[in-house]
Amino acid sequence: FVLMGYYFEHVYDITKLKKKHLLFCVLSSVLAILFTCFITYYQTTIEVCTPHQLERFFNCFICIPAFTIFILIKRLGITIKKKYLGHWISIAGSAVFGVYLIEKITRALLIKVYDILHPFIGSFFASLVWCFAVLVFSLIIIIILKRTPIIKKLVNKFI
């Protein structure tokens, strides 16, 4: 991920990607997710699995959708002309690594969102709302921490 991110951030010109390349990335991502769902489903049909065992396939093809999202957002950022929206995208982008680091903690803290919504809107939509809540909550925490002088000083000292 680090090398791929560096390459597409600093070496490769994303504006050279044509629509057919972007469409290929999106289709590859959908196929990777579908294949992950299929092998997870297949695993549950041949044995009874714990949630931890089911997670063993989730990271197999995650680089494909992650790469696609990175490319699409980077391309969107290049094409956005409005400074206000670009400013907020820049703030969110600078907090992505921090969100990645605390996501598991905030996911555990916000499991009640899923538990409350599940009976009303079903597990799929409850999961989407839960994921969005985790993202927003993590983003807010990281933005606040980045603006805290003590944390900012520690980060600048060690990184």
Image (spheres, rainbow, N blue to C red):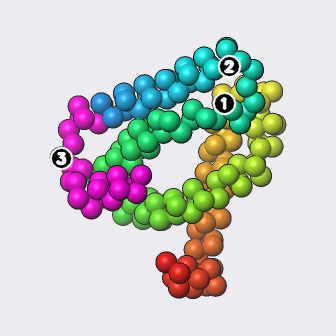
Q: Amino acid at mark 3?
A: Lys
Q: Which residues are magenta?
A: 1-22
Percent x, y of residue 16: 18, 46
Tag 2 residue:
44
Q: Which class describes the residues within 10 Å of circle 3: few (<14), some (14-19), or many (20+)?
A: few
Name the residue located 33 percent from the left edge and 59 percent from the top edge: 6
Name the residue located 56 percent from the left edge and 22 percent from the top edge: 39
* Frontmost residue, 98 versus 77: 98
Tag 1 residue:
54
Are dots 2 and 3 in contact, CB under 8 Å?
no
Q: Amino acid at mark 1?
A: Leu
Name the residue located 34 percent from the left edge and 47 percent from the top edge: 71
- Element type where label 1 sits in the image: helix
Left or right: 6 with respect to 51?
Answer: left
Q: Nearer the viewer, mark 1 or mark 3?
A: 1
Percent x, y of residue 101: 60, 59
Q: Which class describes the residues within 10 Å of circle 2: few (<14), some (14-19), or many (20+)?
A: some
Percent x, y of residue 100: 57, 56
Mark 1 and mark 3 lie on one chain; the one further toward the N terminus is 3
Q: Is residue 125 visible?
A: yes
- Element type where label 2 sits in the image: helix
Percent x, y of residue 47: 71, 18
- Element type where label 3 sits in the image: helix
Residue 16, labelled with which disc?
3
Q: Which class describes the residues within 10 Å of circle 1: few (<14), some (14-19), or many (20+)?
A: some
Name the residue located 67 percent from the left edge and 14 percent from the top edge: 45
